[in-house]
Amino acid sequence: MLQRWINNLRFKILQMRGLTELPVLPSSASSTRTLDEREMYPHLFPNYRPEPVPEITVGSIVLWVLLKLAVLIPAMWFLMERYKWHQYWFASLGILWLLVVYPAFMQYQQFKAHTHILEENALCAKCRHFEETGHFCKILDEHVSIDHTPCGGERWEAKSLGHDNNDETFS
């Protein structure tokens, strides 16, 4: 009871000072992110979200496809062998389509729509260090959103229009 009252008092003081909704600014000296006060005491900062993590990425889509296939293929194989349903092989294709391929396709379409919105509205999407398949910055390895720029624009470099030659040999 007393601890809750003290926490509420701390939160009210931080609220009056305007420190409850601070943006995340990673230090430019190191690329690793450390816990700050808002992450160590989440009950004092209920409105704080440290970093926007996308719900759908290409990796998550592939992972769920593989997990579903790992469960469905042995289950269908067992049912085909157990009940002698070999003449109904097309039903197994339909089940694979309905439970694996079509949901993955719809998630990928949703991912592409989110990527398109991000490319239109975010500074990071026009940077050469932006990774489209995971919505993250290659340098800081942090996810990007419309509201969150990991480096704050300090390490922004324009995408090259032609081929990206990293070859430093002179001819």
Image (spheres, rainbow, N blue to C red):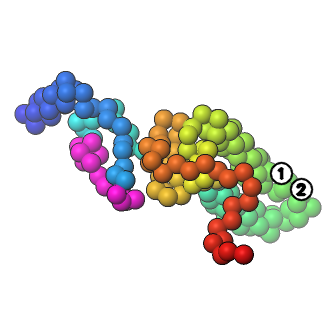
Q: Which amino acid is tagged 2?
A: Phe
Q: Residue 94 carries which label?
A: 1
Disc 1 secondary structure class: helix
Magenta includes 37?
Answer: yes
Identify the residue shown where x is 31% and y is 55%. Answer: 34
Magenta range is 29-41
* Foreground residue among 83 and 168: 168
**Does the CB distance between marks 2 and 1 fall below 8 Å?**
yes
* Foreground residue among 141 and 127: 127
Report x, y in % for residue 65: 68, 57
Report x, y in % for residue 114: 64, 38
* Mark 2 crowd level (few <14, some 14–19, many ≥20, 10 Å Cα): few
In the displayed structure, does residue 71 sit left or right of residue 55? Answer: right
* Foreground residue among 76 and 170: 170
Residue bearing mark 2: 90
Report x, y in % for residue 71: 66, 62
